[in-house]
Amino acid sequence: MDFVRYLFEQPRDPDQVVLLGDNLTVTYGELTEQLNRVSGWIFQKYGKDKKFLILADNSLFFILSYLGIMQSGNTAVLVETRPSLSDLKYIIDNTVPPALFVQKKYLPALASLNAEFITEETLSSMPETGLSPHPSNLEKDEAVAVIIFTSGSTGTKKGVMLTHKNLAANTESIIQYLQLTGKDRVCAVLPFFYCYGASLLHTHIRVGGSLVLTRKAFLGSIIKDIDKYQCTGFAGVPSTFQILINKTPFLKSPLPSLRYLTQAGGKLADKYITMLSDHFPDKQIFIMYGATEATARLSYLPPAMIRSKMGSIGKGIPGVTLAVLDENGRKVKAGELGEIAARGENIMKGYFGDPEGTAAVIRNGWLYTGDIGTADEEGYIYVTGRSKNIIKSGGYRISPYEVENVILSLANVIGCVVLGIPDDLMGESVVAVVQTKSGPDTSTTSEKIITHCNRSLPSYKVPQKVVFMDQFPLNSSGKVDAMRLKEIVINAGNNEINR
């Protein structure tokens, strides 16, 4: 079964609302009618087995383009909405799309590209084709449905190829452990071009639920949206919750309609997980772990275990085997370090046009995530660091996560990223980039932070330098852009930043 047919497989009331937002109300009947028209038009004009790039915010245009491309027997290529022209040209040169689905507001930035553009106006004026929206080639589970371009640790763009089977398998697993039904409505602030955001779209359409599309500049406005639209779910990356907790009245809001919150896309500091748990004792809080290469989700920590397994990413989701393996591919003993690896039907087909890169991460049927971790006696897994982010200083290997948690335990510190900065003597020096609650507040000084670290950490893990910033740079997915942050710190040298 093709993925789009899978999403709409269950019968539902055509008058039921599926999409809501500012000046937006779309029913399932309207969505399927428009989707079939778009899909038929794409198939009639371009045929099948092509790759079409999409550049758009969360919108009806994105959804129709994304699902219409897949339903027509083609592959959707997802990119962030703020790509550099060089990155965009690289992706276009490699995928050779016959046309680009681009939200009209982004056209001026792409004026130099010699390409055919399809916009909202194009979709709204499409005629009925009378063609079947389900070409027969989509019966093949292994056909590539989507390619998501994501930055590797070196900045090189990698195209993650996900099949119809990958998407369906991961969607079914997420629905199962979140216990989603047609009564669920999620407030979607995460972009759909990001695998975590796309999973919200997939799961809620599959169960006949609904989504509130909100991409407002001020995150605090989502508090009103959750109440206004009676949302039952909310999903965010670490920076989403840190901003909500520190910059908005989120923890003063009862949000009675919310049934659950989910967090993934990086490690949220223990103190913030505790704050959420304290304020929302009646809501389920799912701490999750995943990767684009795994479609979206790999593991979750059951809400009831947040306190007893603080800091854990839990165990594999239904249908996924998650393990910590040594260099020989054997499971490590409890407490020992190894690389986190996964098996399941959600694991990508591979990197587009990169068989060597694929072979480097998929070995003996396992996806090696690049994350270093350990498991306890009960099999619950803890991430201790990213293999490529481990700081090597004076012969020691240092996990940034451990140092960040110590610094974040200070009451006035609301954000911390620990980096390894090139150093002629040590190889890399440990540098902490810190955001404080009140901006330029002299009560939290470099000396105070370093003294606090000295009390809790061995000397080789204590930062050699503390840099203060008012705001961390974020990427289009809302996560801290560590590469950009590192560039800023290196370029600043001995100067303080925004302080």
Image (spheres, rainbow, N blue to C red):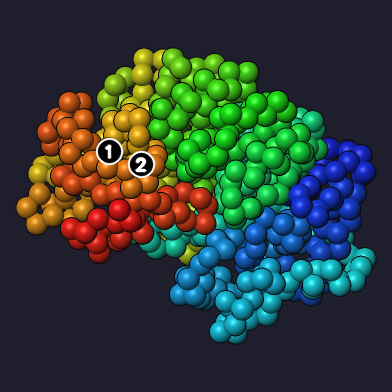
Residue under the point 37% across and 46% down: 439
Residue 430 visible in the picture: no
The residue that label 2 is drawn on is 436
Point out residue 315 in the picture as x, y percentages from the top left corner: 48, 25
Discs 2, 1 touching: Cβ within 8 Å: yes
Residue 414 visible in the picture: yes
Can you say whether 338 is above or below 418 in the image? above
Q: Secondary structure at mark 2?
A: strand
Left or right of 363? Residue 21 is right
**For residue 268, what is the image quadrant?**
top left
Name the mark on residue 170: none
Can you say whether 347 is above or below 251 in the image? below
Left or right of 321? Residue 494 is left
Residue under the point 9% across and 57% down: 424
Task: Estimate how packed mark 1 is, as few (under 14), some (14 to 19) or many (20 or more) residues with alpha carbons within 10 Å.
Answer: some
Identify residue type, mark 1: Thr
Can you say whether 106 is above or below 210 in the image? below
Can you say whether 343 is above or below 160 in the image? above
The residue that label 1 is drawn on is 444
Point out residue 142 in the picture as x, y percentages from the top left corner: 63, 51
Tell me the CA gap for discs 2 and 1: 8 Å
Q: Secondary structure at mark 1?
A: loop
**For residue 102, what is the image quadrant?**
bottom right
Identify residue type, mark 2: Thr
Residue under the point 46% across and 75% down: 86
Give 226 or 50, whichever is nearer the viewer.
Answer: 226
Q: Earlier in the sequence, mark 2 or mark 1?
A: 2
Residue under the point 6% across and 52% down: 425
Point out residue 48 in the picture as x, y percentages from the top left corner: 72, 67
**For residue 226, what is the image quadrant?**
top right
Give 297 or 55, whichever is nearer the viewer.
Answer: 55
